[in-house]
Amino acid sequence: MSKKIAIFPGSFDPPTEGHLNIVKRGVEIFDEVVVAVSGSISKKYVFTPEERVALWKKLLKKVPGARVETFSGLLVDYVKRRGSKIILRGLRNVTDFEYEIQMATTNRKLNPKIETVFIMTEGTYSHIAASLIKEVVTMGGSAKGMVPPLVEKELRKRLQVPK
Ligand code: PNS
C-alpha cells in the first residue's frame, strides 16, 4: 500500500500551539505529515516564508513523521506533485467552518482526487488566532500557552517588544 502523506498547508505567521497539536495528532493517523508553508509574500506577514520554515524545523525536531516545506501556486497542484491525496486542516469553530467549506469545495472542483480531512482543534487551543497573538505581543502581553516559547521569543524580537 502506498504511503499516506497528509499535507498541512497554511500561512503559519507564526506557528501556534494549536497548529503544532494538529501535526502531532496528524502523525498518529498518517504515515507522514508535511507542513506546507504558503510562499505568498504579503506585508501583513511578520515572518518571511523561509523564517516560518526555520521555526517549524525547530518545532518538529521531536515529532517523528513530520517535516516542513514551502509551496507556491495552487495547493492542489503541490499536493499532487508531492505524491499525496490528502489536505489536512484544523477546525476551531463555525467561522473556520464557513471558510473551510469554500476552500475544500474549490479544491475538490480543481482536483476531485484530493480529499480535505479535518481535525477538530483541541479545546484548550480553539481561541488561538495568529492575528490576535501578534496584537497581544505587540501590546506587551504574554502569548504563553498560545505559541511555543521559541516562537514567542522570535516574535518579541521581530516586533521589537522588550521581554
Ligand atoms: O492559514 P491560512 O492562511 O488559512 O492558509 C490558507 C492557504 C495557504 C491554505 C490557502 O490560501 C491556499 O491554499 N493557498 C494556495 C493557493 C490556492 O490553492 N488557492 C485556492 C485555495 S481554495
Image (cartoon, rainbow, N blue to C red):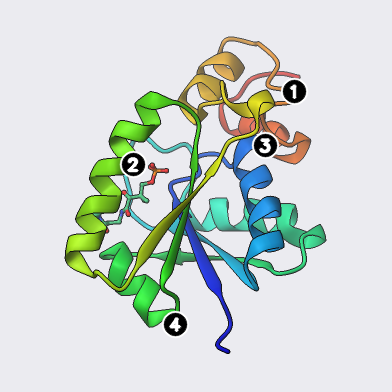
User: Considering the image in quadrants, where does the C terminus appear?
Assistant: top right
Badge 4 local density, few (<14 within 10 Å), some, or many (20+)?
some
> Residue at horizontal 70%, vertical 16%?
142
Q: Residue at x 52, y 66 (%)?
A: 6
Q: Is residue 64 left or right of residue 53?
A: right
Q: Distance from label 1 to label 4 (Cα)?
A: 37 Å
Q: State the image quarter where residue 140 is shown.
A: top right
Q: Is residue 128 left or right of residue 124?
A: left
Query: Front-most of 163 and 129?
Result: 129
* 1 or 2: mark nearer the eye: 2
* Residue type for callout 2: Glu
Q: Under 8 Å from ligand 1: the CB of mark 1?
A: no
Residue that numbered label 4 is attached to: 83
Q: CA distance from mark 3 to mark 1?
A: 10 Å
Q: CA distance from mark 2 to mark 3?
A: 20 Å
User: Mark 3, mark 4: which one is toward the viewer?
Assistant: 4
Pointer 3: what residue? 17
Distance between mark 1 and mark 2 Cα atoms: 27 Å
The residue tagged 2 is 100
Measuring from the top left, give residue 1's x and y in whole percent: 58, 89
Residue sitting at the far right: 62
Q: CA distance from mark 3 to mark 4?
A: 28 Å
Question: Closer to the camera, 79 or 114?
Answer: 114
Asked whether 41 or 89 is in front, the reply is 89
- Mark sitting on residue 75: none
- Which residue is drawn at the image coordinates 50% and 20% (left, top)? 132
